[in-house]
Image (spheres, rainbow, N blue to C red):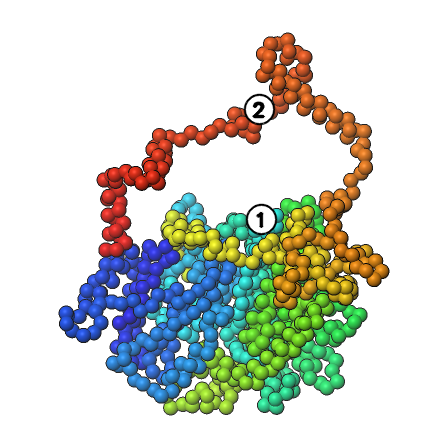
């Protein structure tokens, strides 16, 4: 047998699973549902070890031996022989949301369960194993023990605010014991010392190991079930004058109709689209961790292929294969299923931003636009006008080629209108500062306002053909606009506006570029080709050669390796299940029928072509149906009552881990990307605000170049979106923030830590002089007047006189104590009294006798003079040895 022993982080509570190894093809797992203490589990393993020891002199293993140490179970999988167990053996912390850690899987281990004595070998087993392991679990798979990653922050926190009466009734109906996903974030009972822990079912679309856990879902305690998501997770720290604000970006890739670029296009018969990714940006004040007391905000947007039956034939080996519509869909049946899913999860309005080309010599991308417009027009005629799907077509490629138009300025206008319609989520009521400093844009903001804050209603759905380069830039601009509103709602900026070339936007841009590169590698096989800098037209000439390499890499991947990757994804997600006597995965000419269930069996019930939404969805709009308190949603929740002092809901111990030896070098919150350390220029002493626009020569990675580079930079900056024009007398150097900048620094150019310099051109000669003296306008932001007014001078003179008189009084009181001298000075009456322990005088702290004795003993121990141990010390040490080793 295999025994799987799991513990909580503090290693004080344990559960044990028994896995039978005598069954060649079946999975037999026994869970006694009992919680053991450390002492009990040690005794249990000790008894098992003694009971399994072989006799002396007999060959074979003796007792129990540890096979592997792991951080979680990904699941169980079977091909043609017995079952394998997939374990997480290495992890890395990637983000922290309210004290709940999010980890990235770094390494996994697959262990074959049945014994060699009962193993029934199959010649194709090794090939299936190799295909399964092609899905690299160490690349961009994430999990959390206590936070539900498959749902948005808005959903998770809305569940917590469910009425208390509802939870009480649910507690009595709950049969199975559960574990609280929010640790200490329960709801206090009235007058009692208990808290309710709420656990929701994960959203299956974004869970990637759902099929792997299916075999054990109903037999083991839910503490064993660890759901993983695939996509991207990144977190950076924005320091606003020392106040830590964490900016987190989480992308969840859909596990339905998942696959690679040219092999998965459009939608399947259930309304799931290819390359569907939900991107959520979370902003919160890290100085307060608790969900109930802290300030949290989030904004969600979606990307996904055009929801139609369409594909591209890659057998022609063309860079852009022709687009073909596979099936006629006059009643927009597939689009209806897709938008129904979105109405349930996000509410209304659903806004479609379609970035495909509108004008083409040969009709290519425009085919999709025409069909999508027809589908949306058809579906909208049955929806109430206030909840209609909003369609925004915008040919981004055409605007990019135009020299007169600025792409990002136009995108910024679209982003503002989108965020105003959907709103965003924040768990605090509007700040008092927004009442003191009212802003017109804030009053026009949409969404749903409740007593506890704001809810996002509706979502932006962005698509181009691939949903990679253009889509990522558009999502960045919408995210940047939403970030400004989020910062404003938390009272961190005075207006909901953010400009380019600030530390905050540069940090956010880097997060989005990492996000775009990761998603592009997963779906397209290469990193992004066109970045935000490309569309700002400030990318360096070296970027063009990189773009060409990425294009070639993408083409190679699509032509040669995508088919193998698609097979691996189909096997991993359980879309294809190997069966004796049926064709193998590599023998299938296509996987079309695997993803389209209606090709194998006709559905008995047909959905209405007019009432195309799920019953009950329309009644609650604009709120999403999934977040409404109703009987159907309550079935998805499991509620458990805890005592408020229980260890498993102690978020402090979970986050700070006082039972572990930790070092500052390895502490996540110190090692993460930091706006002050990584983005703020090293020579800025005047304005450390992350919302100040920096000139290109002030950025953290810029270096000085030659005259032609400087002229080029000035030209680039004039065309850059939202960047202020440079002063006419200064021609400043710039380097685009890429790898080439660091290379130039190493060659001996001026370092980024050097003094800021001013470059002036006089004729053909270029002189570089140090800008030592700075004007008061540069330093303080205002021009100081030359001479103070008479009133100010009078006030200052009286202030000086008072100070001088005070000094006279102090000196005379020390030298003479007679009343005669005291009458000569002004008698100052203090308006406030200070105790002895104040800013002028400090009393040394008093240490008690026991503390002094301990300190003396510590000093003596350092000199080698040890004190004899007392009886209590011996007993404590003996207890420690017994618990630790026996």
Instruction: Judge by depth and name the residue closer to the eye, 355 or 473.
Output: 473
Local secondary structure at mark 1: strand
Where disc 2 sits, the SS reads loop
Residue 200's x, y, as percent? 45, 62
Residue 14 lies in quadrant: bottom left
The residue drawn where x is 59% and y is 73% is 527
Is 800 drawn above or below residue 291 in the view shown?
above
* Mark 1 burial class by Cα count in 10 Å: few <14, some 14-19, many 20+: few
The residue at the point 53 percent across, 71 percent down is 253
Measured from the top left, where is residue 134 in percent x and y?
A: 46, 78
In the figure, is residue 654 to the left or right of 607?
Answer: left
* Point 36% across, 55% down: residue: 10
Mark 2 Cα within 10 Å, few/some/many (few <14, many 20+)? few
On-image quarter of the C terminus: bottom left
**Residue 502 x/y as whole percent:** 67, 57
Q: Read off the residue under disc 1.
A: 243
Q: Give me the disc on residue 833.
A: 2
């Amino acid at each position: 047998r295999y025994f799987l022993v799991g513990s909580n982080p503090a290693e004080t509570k344990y559960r044990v699973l028994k896995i039978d190894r005598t069954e060649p093809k079946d999975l037999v797992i026994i869970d006694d549902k009992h919680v053991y203490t450390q002492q009990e589990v040690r005794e249990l393993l000790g008894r098992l070890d003694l009971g399994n020891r072989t006799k002396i002199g007999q060959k074979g293993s003796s007792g129990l031996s540890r096979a592997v140490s792991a951080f979680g179970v990904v699941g169980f999988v079977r091909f043609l022989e017995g079952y394998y167990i997939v374990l997480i053996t290495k992890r890395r912390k990637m983000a922290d949301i309210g004290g709940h850690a999010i980890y990235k899987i770094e390494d996994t281990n697959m262990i074959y369960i049945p014994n060699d004595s009962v193993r029934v070998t199959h010649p194709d087993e090794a090939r299936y194993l190799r295909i399964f392991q092609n899905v690299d679990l160490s690349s961009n798979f994430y999990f959390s023990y206590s936070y539900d990653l498959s749902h948005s922050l808005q959903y998770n926190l809305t569940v917590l605010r469910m009425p208390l009466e509802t939870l009480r009734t649910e507690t009595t109906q709950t049969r199975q014991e559960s574990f609280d996903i929010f640790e200490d974030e329960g709801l206090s009972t009235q007058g009692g010392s208990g808290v309710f822990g709420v656990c929701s079912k994960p959203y299956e679309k974004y869970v990637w190991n759902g099929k792997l856990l299916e075999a054990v879902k109903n037999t083991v305690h839910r503490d064993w079930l660890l759901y993983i998501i695939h996509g991207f997770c990144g977190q950076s720290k924005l320091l606003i004058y020392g106040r830590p604000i964490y900016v987190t970006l989480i992308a969840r890739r859909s596990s339905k109709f998942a696959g690679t670029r040219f092999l998965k296009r459009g939608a399947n018969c259930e309304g799931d689209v290819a390359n569907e990714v939900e991107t959520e940006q979370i902003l919160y004040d890290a100085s307060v961790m608790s969900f109930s007391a802290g300030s949290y905000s989030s904004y969600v947007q979606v990307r996904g292929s055009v929801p139609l039956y369409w594909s591209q034939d890659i057998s022609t080996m063309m860079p852009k294969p022709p687009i073909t519509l596979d099936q006629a869909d006059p009643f927009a049946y597939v689009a209806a299923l897709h938008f129904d899913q979105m109405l349930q999860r996000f509410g209304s309005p659903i806004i479609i931003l379609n970035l495909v080309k509108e004008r083409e010599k040969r009709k290519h991308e425009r085919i999709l636009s025409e069909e999508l417009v027809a589908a949306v027009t058809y579906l909208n005629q049955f929806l109430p006008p206030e909840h209609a799907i909003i369609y925004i077509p915008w040919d981004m490629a055409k605007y990019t080629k135009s020299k007169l138009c600025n792409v990002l300025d136009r995108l910024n206008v679209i982003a503002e209108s989108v965020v105003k319609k959907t709103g965003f989520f924040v768990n605090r009521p509007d700040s008092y500062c927004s009442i003191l400093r009212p802003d017109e844009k804030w009053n026009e903001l949409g969404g749903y306002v409740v007593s506890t804050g704001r809810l996002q209603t509706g979502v932006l759905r962005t698509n181009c053909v691939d949903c990679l380069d253009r889509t990522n830039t558009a999502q960045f601009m919408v995210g940047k606009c939403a970030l400004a509103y989020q910062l404003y709602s938390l009272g961190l900026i005075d207006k909901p506006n953010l400009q380019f070339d600030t530390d905050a936007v540069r940090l956010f841009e880097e997060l989005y570029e990492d996000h775009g590169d990761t998603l592009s590698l997963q779906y397209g096989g290469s990193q992004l080709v066109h970045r935000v800098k490309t569309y700002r037209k400030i990318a360096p000439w070296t970027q063009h050669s990189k773009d060409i390499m990425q294009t070639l890499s993408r083409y190679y991947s699509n032509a040669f390796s995508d088919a193998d990757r698609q097979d691996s994804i189909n096997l991993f997600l359980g879309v294809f299940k190997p069966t004796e006597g049926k064709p193998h995965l590599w023998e299938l000419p296509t996987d079309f029928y695997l993803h389209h269930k209606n090709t194998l069996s006709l559905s008995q019930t047909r959905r209405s072509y007019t009432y195309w939404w799920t019953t009950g969805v329309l009644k609650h709009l604009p709120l999403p149906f999934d977040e409404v308190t109703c009987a159907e949603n309550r079935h998805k929740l499991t509620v458990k009552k805890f005592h408020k002092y229980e260890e498993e809901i102690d978020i402090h111990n979970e986050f700070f881990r006082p039972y572990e030896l930790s070092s500052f070098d390895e502490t996540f919150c110190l090692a993460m990307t930091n706006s002050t350390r990584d983005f703020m220029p090293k020579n800025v002493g005047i304005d450390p605000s992350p919302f100040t626009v920096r000139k290109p020569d002030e950025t953290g990675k810029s270096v000085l170049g030659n005259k032609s580079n400087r002229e080029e930079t000035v030209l680039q900056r004039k065309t850059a979106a939202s960047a202020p024009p440079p002063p006419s007398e200064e021609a400043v150097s710039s380097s685009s923030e890429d790898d080439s900048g660091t290379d130039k620094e190493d060659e001996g150019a001026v370092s980024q830590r050097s003094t800021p310099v001013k470059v002036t051109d006089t004729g053909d000669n270029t002189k570089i002089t140090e800008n030592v003296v700075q004007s008061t306008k540069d330093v303080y932001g205002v021009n100081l007047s030359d001479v103070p007014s008479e009133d100010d001078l009078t006030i200052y003179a009286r202030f000086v006189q008072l100070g001088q008189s005070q000094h006279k009084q102090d000196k005379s009181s020390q030298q003479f104590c007679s009343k005669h001298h005291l009458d000569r000075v002004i008698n100052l009456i203090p308006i406030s009294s200070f105790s002895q322990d104040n800013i002028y005088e400090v009393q040394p702290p008093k240490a008690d006798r026991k503390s002094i004795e301990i300190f003396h003993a510590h000093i003596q121990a350092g000199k080698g003079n040890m004190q004899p141990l007392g009886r209590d010390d011996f007993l404590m040490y003996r207890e420690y040895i017994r618990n630790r080793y026996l």
